[in-house]
Amino acid sequence: MVDYLPVVDLFSGPGGLSRGFEDARNHNFRFKVTVANDSDKNAALTYQENHQNAEFVLGSIAERGTKRKVRNFVKEKTGRETVDLVIGGPPCKGFSLANKMSRNMENPMNHLITHFFDMVKKLDPTAFVMENVPGIMAMEGGKVVESLISDFKRLGYRNADSWLLNAADYGVPQLRRRAFLIGSKSDIPIEKPKPTHAPKDLAGVSNLKPYVTVKEAIDDLPEIRPGREGYASCSYSSKVPNGFQQMMRKKSSRVQDHVVTKNTPLVIKRIRSVPPGGNWEDIPRELMQVGGKYGGIELAHSMIYKRLLKNEPSITITNFRKGMIIHPVQHRLLSVREAARIQTFPDDYKFEGGLSSRQQQVSDAVPVLLGRRVAETMLIHLHKVIRLATVN
C-alpha cells in the first residue's frame, strides 16, 4: 500500500517541479500534489493537462481570494487545513543574473517571495521547498537569503538551509544552476542531494556517471530542415534510443511538439555562420547589421545565437527563441520538444498555448529530474519524521 503525502505547489508554471516530486519514491511513500497555483493561463492549461488529479487555482497568490481558494481546496482534498509539504518557485526576474539593475528587494517581482512565505505560514506544512535562480544567493551580499532563513526559523522551521545545485550533476543534460531554500519543523537532518553525474574527465575518478550530453538527449528526434516549422506530431527516427532517450520515451509512441520558430533567409544565413560552441561574434558583421536589430552588437549578450556543443551538456535553456539557441548540427533553433528533453520533461508531457508561450513555459520550468532529486531527499526526511512520530 502506498502512503501519499499531500503537497501544495505555488507558482507552479507548467509543472516541472510537481512532476519531479510525484516521480520520487521512498519505500511505500510518495508525494501527491493536491493543489497547485499559477497566474499564467497557458501554464495553467499545461499543468491541468498533465496533472489531472490536482486542483488548480488560477490567479495571483498575492490576492486574498486566490489564497482563500488554495486553502479551501486543501481542506476539501485532504480533510484537514494543512499539508506535509509546500513547494514552489516565486517568479525570479528580479534576482536573475540577466537583471543586475533589479537584484534588490525594491523590485516588486521580488515581493512575491513574501506571499510564498505567507502561504507557508497559513498552510503550516511540516516542510517546505522554495526554488529560485542562483542570483538570489548573492543578492545584497547574501543577506537576503540569510534574512529569509531567519524568518522561516522564527516561523518554526528551525531546520532551514539553502542549497545551490547544478542540474547537470543530477542527470539533466544542461548546465543550469538553481537555488533552493528548504526547511522543516523537525530537527532530523535534511541531506543535500548527492551528485550522480560529473564532467567526463572527473566521472571515472569520482565513480559518478559522466554528464548527459545534448547529443545523448536529442539525437533520436527527426531532422527539421532550415526554414521549416517542424512537426506537431511525428514518428521517432529509426535510431535505437540510448538510456536517457528510453527514459524520455517511456510512455510515448510518437514525438509531439517538435516545432520551431520559422526563420527568415537572413536568420538562416546567420545561423550557418556559427560553428559548434560559437555565438553571434562568429557571424559576419554585415549580416548582424542588416535590419538594424543588432546595430549595437558590441552590447549583445554572449548567448545570442549560441550554438550548442553536441558532446557537452547544454547551456542554461532560457527563452530559446529570444536567445536564438542553435541546434548543435542542424542550421536552426531548438524545437519545443528538444528544449523539453533538455529540461527532462518526458515526451508524453503536453504543452498548451501558442508557440511562443510553449517556448517560454519550457524555458522557465524547473528541470523535472532536478526536482525529483530534491524530492527524494525530502521524502527520506519526511519518512523519518513520520516513523519517529509513530514510535513516540
Image (cartoon, rainbow, N blue to C red):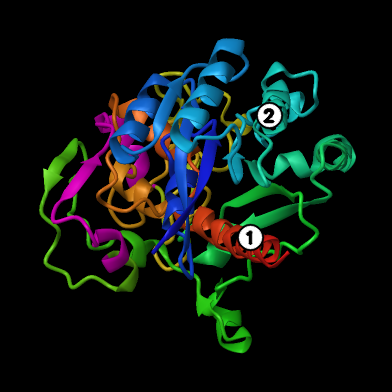
Quarter of the view holding residue 257: top left
Does dot 1 land on a helix, a strand or a loop?
Answer: helix
Relative placement, left or right, of 146 versus 360 is right
Relative placement, left or right, of 45 versus 108 is left
Q: Is residue 11 above or below residue 146?
A: above
* Residue at image point 58% right, 57% down: 374
Residue 352 position in % (x across, y down): 29, 30
- For marks 2 and 1, the one nearer the N-term is 2
> Which quarter of the rendering shows the C terminus?
bottom right
User: The disc labelled 1 sits on which kind of residue?
Assistant: Ile
In front: 61, or 289?
61
Quarter of the view holding residue 222: bottom left
Q: Is residue 363 visible?
A: yes
Q: Magenta region: which residues?
A: 246-273
Residue at which label 2 appears:
99
> Which quarter of the rendering shows the N terminus?
bottom left
Residue at which label 1 appears:
386
